[in-house]
Amino acid sequence: MRNLPNKSIAPRKRSYQVRIPTGYFGSSDTRARVLFVGSYPPRECGIATFTEDVRNAYDLRQGFQSNVIAVSDEGTDYRYSSCVIGQIHRDMPFSYVDAARTANDHKCDIINVQHEYGLFGGDNGRMLIDFLAGLNKPVVITLHTTLPDPDAQMRYVTRELCNQSETVIVLAETSRQILQDVYGIDARK
């Protein structure tokens, strides 16, 4: 295992105002456009199904189609639906940079990342940090797993992912508490 730096990576430079457009939580003509990042069908995995379900529910509520940057396995050629506008190839660092460019050029207001350990490349998904650092739009990250006893590398990666995101979503109250107590994540995230 590599030695980890004692300090975290510098937070992304914000070239935008973090604001949720009017109507994001209510009914108005102005709605936030979300770009989803995660595995996606026809890839067979739970996160792919979850990403598709969240996207479909969001699109139904908003009344328009959102897009996806899909995370693909090495050596696999999926035939994605038209909503997939780009790919991250799990173990190819340059694809994270390309995906960040695609996201920055997209008409979305918010980027929602579906995170699971093992989905993204690098030690504990460390390559995702570079993707987030290259974005100039607000990020909402959904953490599907929050381990209560992480090793140093997992703690470091998880903290950086949270630090690079404006909002962190977890799927259970226990996970929220673990992020605060074990990882030191601000409860306001």
Image (tube, rainbow, N blue to C red):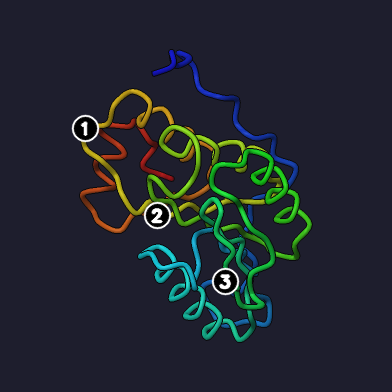
Frontmost of labels 2 and 3 is 2
Q: Residue furthest front?
A: 75
- Upstream in sequence: badge 1 or badge 3: 3
Q: Check disc 2 and report its element: helix, strand or loop.
A: strand
Kindly identify which residue carries mark 1. Answer: 149
Based on the displayed image, in which of its 4 quarters is residue 177 positioned? top left
Kindly identify which residue carries mark 2. Answer: 169
Determine the CA span between mark 2 and mark 3: 17 Å
Position in image of residue 22 (x %, y %): 63, 70
Position in image of residue 144 (x %, y %): 34, 54
| Residue sitting at x 44%, y 66% | 48
- Vertical side of 87 occupied by 1: above or below: above
Q: Nearer the viewer, residue 93 or 78?
A: 78
Number of numbered discs present?
3
Kindly identify which residue carries mark 3. Answer: 24
- Vertical side of 92 occupied by 151: above or below: above
Q: Which mark is residue 110?
A: none
Q: Nearer the viewer, residue 164 or 157?
A: 157
Q: Amino acid at mark 2?
A: Ile
| Residue sitting at x 59%, y 50% | 89
Position in image of residue 162 (x %, y %): 46, 40
Q: Check disc 1 and report its element: helix, strand or loop.
A: loop
Frontmost of labels 2 and 1 is 1
- Vertical side of 127 occupied by 83: above or below: below
Quick one: label 1, few (<14), some, or many (20+) residues within 10 Å?
few
Q: Nearer the viewer, residue 123 or 12?
A: 123
| Residue sitting at x 62%, y 74% | 66
